[in-house]
Image (cartoon, rainbow, N blue to C red):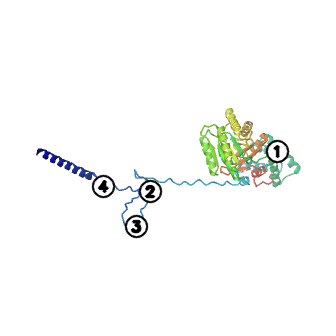
Amino acid sequence: MKEYLLIALALLGVLILGGIGLVVPRLRRRPEPPLPRTEVDTRAEEGLAGPPVQAPEAELSTGVLVEPPPVVAPPAVEVPEPTAGRLVRLRSRLSRSQTVFGKGLLGLLSRDRLDEDVWEEIEDNLITADVGIDATREIVDRLRERTRVLGTRTAAELRALLAAELVNALDPGLDRSLRTAPKEGVPAVLLVVGVNGAGKTTTCGKIARVLIADGRSVLLGAADTFRAAAADQLQTWAGRVGAETVRGPEGADPASVAFDAVKRGIDTGVDTVLVDTAGRLQNKVGLMDELGKVKRVVEKHGPIDETLLILDATTGQNGLEQARVFTEVVNVTGVVLTKLDGTAKGGIVIAVQRKLGIPVKLVGLGEGPDDLAPFDPAQFVDALLGTDAPGPTA
């Protein structure tokens, strides 16, 4: 009888424990939390008008709203101003040099009596304008002879006489064209060199605009690896006109970057590759040797078509020594004379060409992106002399 009682108690205990196991989970269950606001709630109340609204995409585990990245429009590609007639349009920028040539020289030449004192004053004006001593003497001697023989006296005649002598001093027969056309599937290569502080990288960007304005496709090589800012600046100039830039890490071998730029130009089939080099003083032998290496490495692809020396017009006669050394190292084929709008010494153009036989091919007449113009001797002299010639004075 005891055995049956124990069995009954055991069964009762099992039933009690089973009942507790069923009740406790129900007591512990929490109400389900509402869905995050950023999810699509598929349990929208009935009777609401329209389909459920898709909420912005969110991180579901945190409920933080993830905004889509802003759409950045690509920069508009600029269309550079055509270079034809650009020098004529920029003639007002030579106002300081006009004071020396137009008002100064014409005022002296139009005096009733041209004695030795007047001729000496004319010489002083030309030398002050950085024409150079030898060129000044030649110009003055020819002017003295022609005014004596021709008896030139009117303002218009004097202006024409002076203009003819200045144009002649600029040697209008020199080839001032830029060789920028590709040949046999290889782009033309232009190497840009110059001293520190001449505005070389900016001018390099402007040269690219000149070439694109004349219908050339251009690629720029940022071989100035000493300054990261130089490569950034060049890339900004290139981006404005839709040109590609090849650059290397800061401190990379400039010759390697220049080589890669020309190779990229060959692969992409552009017309012209423009290689910007680091500014360097002409009396630093190591840096000049490095520039020579850049030239030799680039020429593994073929000869360099143009080596352009950037000269700051405000440096005056010091620019002649710069040009001489650079010519010896890399065979400069043309000069780009910048900052002519900020100096009265426009005669430096004459001095550079007479001393070195290197033509000035481009002149910078302002800070605007299209203020670089192809150089034309007749237009340049016409701008120097201005339009208002003085009449005879006592």
Residue 105 placement (x, y as % from top left) = 78, 48
Q: CA distance from mark 3 to mark 1?
A: 96 Å
Frontmost residue, 239 versus 168: 239
Q: In the image, what residue type sits under mark 3?
A: Ala
The residue labelled by disc 4 is: 31
Frontmost residue, 294 versus 185: 185
The residue labelled by disc 2 is: 56
Mark 4 or 2, nearer chain start: 4
Judged left or right of residue 214, residue 36 is: left
Is there a contact, CB below 8 Å, between mark 4 and mark 2?
A: no
> Residue at image x 22%, y 51%?
19
Judged left or right of residue 291, residue 62 is: left
Q: In the image, what residue type sits under mark 2?
A: Pro
Count of numbered labels shown in the rendering: 4
The residue labelled by disc 1 is: 140
> Compared with residue 296, is residue 379 higher up or lower down, i.e. above or below?
below
**Badge 1: residue crowd in 10 Å (few <14, some 14–19, many ≥20):** some
The part of the image, by quadrant, that contains residue 188 is top right
- Asked which secondary structure carries label 1, the reply is helix
The residue labelled by disc 3 is: 49
Q: CA distance from mark 2 to mark 1?
A: 82 Å
Farthest residue toward the left?
A: 1
Residue 46 placement (x, y as % from top left) = 36, 65
Q: Closer to us: mark 1 or mark 4?
A: 4
Q: Closer to us: mark 2 or mark 1?
A: 2
Residue 376 placement (x, y as % from top left) = 76, 50
Is residue 310 in view from this perspective? no
Q: CA distance from mark 1 to mark 4?
A: 106 Å
**Badge 4: residue crowd in 10 Å (few <14, some 14–19, many ≥20):** few
Mark 3 or 2, nearer chain start: 3
Farthest residue toward the right?
A: 149
Q: CA distance from mark 4 to mark 3?
A: 28 Å
